[in-house]
Image (tube, rainbow, N blue to C red):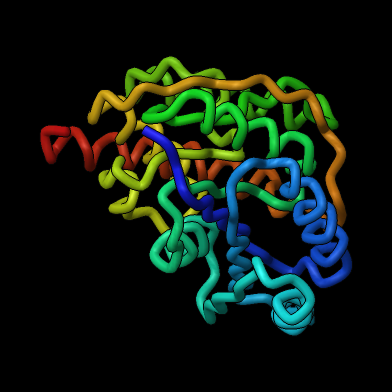
Amino acid sequence: MSYHRISIVLPVYNQADHIAEIVREYESALARVPLPHESLLVPNACRDNSAAVCRELAEMFPAVRVIESELGGWGRAVKTGLRCAEGDLLCYTNSARTAAPDLVLLLLYAIAYPDTVIKANRRVRESLGRRLGSRLYNLECRALFRLTQGDINGTPKVFPRRFTALLQLCRDDDLIDAEFNVVCRRENYPLLEVPIFASRRHGGRSTTNLRSALRMYWNAFQMWRTLREAGR
């Protein structure tokens, strides 16, 4: 099959100081993709001026739309954007950590391999602590959910709209990425991981710390128990 339009969901959380630079880079790079696109900015529970900056970007770039959410959460923002997306090729990514060339690369893979889920496998992180924490989380998810992916949380994630089970994700938090991979396994969606090596963060500070990491490990275990009880 061929696609007609790409929808790119970009959750925004306290990124007023750098989201404009990111969007400008994305919009320039996306001109190389042979399909029209829309960029959906989802500022969620921001405590800074992110929402206003996003609205200014929507006035500057015809492809940019803004869907504001009073409630926070990575998963909630992803789902909010996907619900409003109009394309038949859907994508979401962590804009603070995704370089424009990597976004374009994943989209081109998705166009070249239709009817396939395309996701990033990040090979470089900026600190030993993050590498170890991510490694532990990936091993936990692989063991609990019988997954084979090398990087559970890796974005961009790109998939065709006809994979409707991926539009019915439930998690409002960071576990939405684990749920995404579980659904792909359960539904037998073909999945291709693409290695990316960029590690530069555009700006802001990561919300991941020891406490949030431990909460993710525990929540992954709780999600496994819930799925097991549901026979899934």
38 displayed left or right of 125 = left
Front-lying residue, 83 or 59: 59
**Residue 132 found in image quarter:** top right
51 displayed left or right of 117 = right
Residue 32 location in percent, x, y?
74, 41
Residue 189 location in percent, x, y?
31, 27
Write the residue at 78% across / 43% down: 100
Residue 199 visible? The answer is yes
Write the residue at 74% across / 32% down: 130
Residue 157 location in percent, x, y?
53, 39
Write the residue at 56% across / 57% down: 9
Q: Which quadrant of the rendered structure holds the N terminus?
A: top left
In the rendered view, would you say 194 is above or below 18? above
In the rendered view, would you say 50 is above or below 141? below
Write the residue at 68% across / 72% down: 62
In the rendered view, would you say 202 is above or below 189? below
Q: Give the mark count.
A: 0
215 displayed left or right of 13 = left
Q: Which quadrant of the rendered structure holds the C terminus?
A: top left
**Residue 67 found in image quarter:** bottom right
